[in-house]
Image (spheres, rainbow, N blue to C red):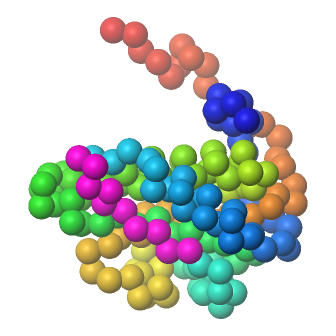
Amino acid sequence: MEVFKAIKERRSIRDFEKKTLSREEINKLIEALIAAPSAGNLQSRKFYFVQNPEMKMELARAALNQKFIADAPLVIVACTDSKIMSRYGEKGVSLYSVQDAACSVMGMMLAAWEMGLGAVWVGAFREEEVRKALSIPKGLRPVALVPVGYPARIPAKTPRVSPEEAVIFV
């Protein structure tokens, strides 16, 4: 698939088939996550791959009871890693590591779409509940939950702002 086509056609998927992902598919998702660029090439991000049904239910509860999270065969929890502070100080923790995780997740979501999988970025969750559910150590911070699986339904395209509204030429 062409990258631009994937960017334009990708949808946020919240309705998944009851079909597990193969080890090969999971490995490709991992490859896409770690291939992303990062500040200073420090790669200050970690990813929890959650397939356990009870853990996925805990994540769904932590995410304001968004049940579709538990229905996905895989939930990826993207975390920042404060080790970046050693090079970039507080801005590395508060901004660069979040950008690193975001870049990784977007690349993975595009790769998933190319593979016939769907995903959705979930940012609405109680961070401490996610941390507790997965025993996430100090130094790592969960910043996104990403349910992944085979789409049971692909929603219609949602409207986007015009280029004139989005871009300012200087």
What's drawn in magenta, residue-wise? 40-49
Residue at 24% from the left image edge and 66% from the top image edge: 82
How many discs mark residues in the rendered view?
A: 0
For residue 149, side relative to residue 3 (left or right): right
Residue 33, x across and y down, in percent: 50, 56
Residue 127, x across and y down, in percent: 42, 74
Q: Nearer the viewer, residue 90 or 7?
A: 7
Residue at 27% from the left image edge and 80% from the top image edge: 138
Q: Nearer the viewer, residue 115 or 125?
A: 115
Q: Is residue 155 above or below residue 135?
A: above
Residue at 82% from the left image edge and 58% from the top image edge: 151
For residue 44, side relative to residue 86 (left or right): right
For residue 76, side relative to residue 22 (left or right): left
Residue 88, x across and y down, in percent: 14, 52
For residue 114, side relative to residue 15 (left or right): left
Q: Nearer the viewer, residue 43 or 60?
A: 43
Decide if residue 73 is in sight here: yes
Q: Quadrant of residue 55?
A: bottom right
Q: Is residue 81 above or below residue 87?
A: below
Q: Quadrant of the N terminus?
A: top right
Decide if residue 8 is in sight here: no
Residue 46 highlighted magenta (yes or no): yes
The extreme front residue here reads 24
Residue at 69% from the left image edge and 36% from the top image edge: 6
Residue 79, x across and y down, in percent: 40, 67
Q: Quadrant of the C terminus?
A: top left
